[in-house]
Amino acid sequence: MKRYFVPLAVFVVLMVFLAIGLTQKPRELPSALLGKPAPAFVLPTLNTPTTSLSTRDLRGQVWVLNVWASWCVACRDEHATMVEMAKLKLVPIYGLNYKDQRADALGWLARFGNPYVASLSDTDGLVGIDYGVYGVPETFVIDKAGVIRRKFVGPVTAQTVRDEIVPLVARLNS
């Protein structure tokens, strides 16, 4: 009888953890960076590699950083939403082109539209690592002081823009 107790107890504990895990929302993963300064970067722009942009250049404004790649299927699903959000002129959107080839990325933007004030080239993915990116797309809302206020994992939808990004940006700009 005792020899069955330990495996049964382990099984019950594993089932409890599984049940808890199944109730979580995978797109709402907590980020250790929320409420902390956005990691600093100086990166070349995709359009003009001889020109660079840094987090210091973006201070004093609320901005969105959208991590994307031309090889990313989910990015294609999200891209129309980013284009529509850019048309609202609510907040400047900067792209972080993640682990991509410049020619592929430029072709992709030419084909699907360019919602970005500038898209930055993170060919090696090092800035993405600093931001805790583990898959694309990911989107960050960053305040005037350069602090990350929200992270969205996966494609941003029109509903997310309407219900979460618009009110957050309005609050951060007031």
Image (cartoon, rainbow, N blue to C red):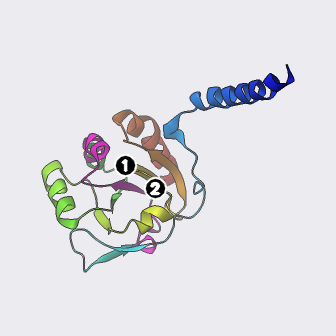
State whether residue 174 appears in this view.
no
In the rendered image, residue 12, in percent from the top left (x then y), is placed at 73, 25
Q: Is residue 149 left or right of residue 154?
A: right
Task: Report the residue at 56% width, 64% height from top.
Answer: 37
Relative height, residue 22 to residue 140 (above, below): above
Label 1 element class: loop
Residue interval drawn in magenta: 54-83
For badge 2, the amino acid type reads Val
Label 2 element class: loop
Task: Report the residue at 75% width, 28% height from top.
Answer: 7
Q: Is residue 17 left or right of residue 69?
A: right
Q: Is residue 104 left or right of residue 79?
A: left
Q: Callout 2: few (<14), some (14-19), or many (20+) C-alpha neighbours within 10 Å? A: some
Relative height, residue 2 to residue 121 (above, below): above
Q: Looking at this view, is 31 or 21 the one in front?
A: 21
Task: Report the residue at 46% width, 68% height from top.
Answer: 59
Quadrant assignment for the N terminus: top right
Q: Is residue 36 left or right of residue 160?
A: right
Relative height, residue 63 to residue 58 (above, below): above
In the rendered image, residue 33, in percent from the top left (x then y), is placed at 57, 57
Q: Do residues under tags 1 and 2 come within 8 Å of each other at their CB atoms?
A: no
Q: Looking at this view, is 136 or 57 the one in front?
A: 136
Task: Report the residue at 22% width, 66% height from top.
Answer: 102
Residue under circle 1? 137
Residue under circle 2? 133
For badge 1, the amino acid type reads Pro
